[in-house]
Amino acid sequence: MSMIKRLLALDGVNVVCHFRDDGKLVEGYGLMSQQEMLNLARFAHDYRRMAQGNADQLAMFTGMRGWTPPHGWILRGVAQSVCSVGNLVCLVDSIDAPLNDILLELREVSRW
Amino acid sequence: MATLDALMQLPGAMAAFEFRGSGELLEHRIAYPDRLNDSILDLLAHMCAANMSIATMQARGWERMTSMKGFYPVKAFTLVGFDWSVVVSGLHREQYKQDGKFSLPPFMGVVMSNETANYEAAFAALENQEPTP
């Protein structure tokens, strides 16, 4: 069984995708079509690059250490949220999802 | 300014701040002035404002492209940095917009140490408290 599938066992996690460094989908599971998973992987890859660039610039302009390289990001919508760590991205329910546990699990799985 | 003071009670809180939609820093609290100052917070606020705007564009685009709903409006943005995280929310602004008000409250944010950060508590604090009048 794929290691990232275990993320789906967490409450509120609806989709999990693993993407390559060029944004291509490696594997994805959950309540989403294959085409939507391809798009989610591409979006997460682009957003990761943007967040990384922002953190790099913040560190450069301020001289403050500890921002870069960033571990991940969360966009919290009114009902759905997107969480990403490393090359993994999850779609989760915004209400009642255990985000602390999800982030910890994402960090753990992203190291594999 | 009870809200900023409440945010400073979160585990690992290093700073709490308010900022305009254009990114300018407004009121703020700093727990460790040797690590953070208002100049850093100002740049951080501008970065968060930019990310909220881009995330909003992406949420709207995603909902148009797919049949999925629930991403817009974007309630909060979080960057989990190497040692520090920042969580910002504009939820109260959305409530004001829905009420037809033109003068919107500021965004609010908190900087936390990753070691003890509690993201769920941060979201709860940012989303449940009454906006500053």
Image: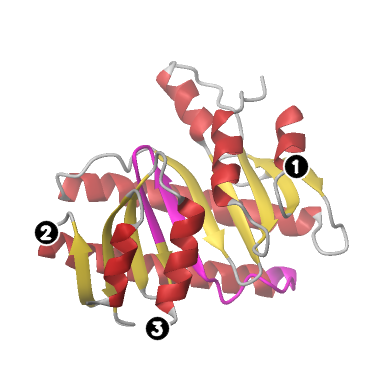
Whether residue A66 appears in magenta in the rendering, the answer is: yes
Give the image location of residue B126, x and y in percent: 59, 37
Considering only vertical position in the picture, is B94 above or below B47?
A: above
Separation of marks 1 and 2 at Cα, in angstroms: 42 Å
Which quadrant is home to the N terminus of chain B?
A: top right
Instruction: Indicate the amino acid at tag 1.
Output: Gln
- Secondary structure beneath dot 2 equals loop
Q: Chain of mark 2?
A: A
Which quadrant is home to the C terminus of chain B?
A: top right
Considering only vertical position in the picture, is B31 above or below A29?
A: above
Residue A78 in which image quadrant: top left
Q: Are marks 1 and 2 in contact (CB under 8 Å)?
A: no
First to last magenta residue range? A61-83
| Residue at (79, 60) in percent of width and height | B36
Callout 1 crowding tier (Cα within 10 Å): few <14, some 14–19, many ≥20? some
| Residue at (61, 52) in percent of width and height | B118
Give the image location of residue B60, x and y in percent: 29, 44
- Secondary structure beneath dot 3 equals loop
User: Mark 3 highlights which residue?
Assistant: A112
| Residue at (32, 47) in percent of width and height | B59
Whether residue B129 appears in magenta in the rendering, the answer is: no
Instruction: Indicate the amino acid at tag 2.
Output: Ser
Foreground residue among B118 and B36: B118
Considering only vertical position in the picture, is A10 above or below B4?
A: below
User: Mark 2 highlights which residue?
Assistant: A33
User: Mark 1 highlights which residue?
Assistant: B9
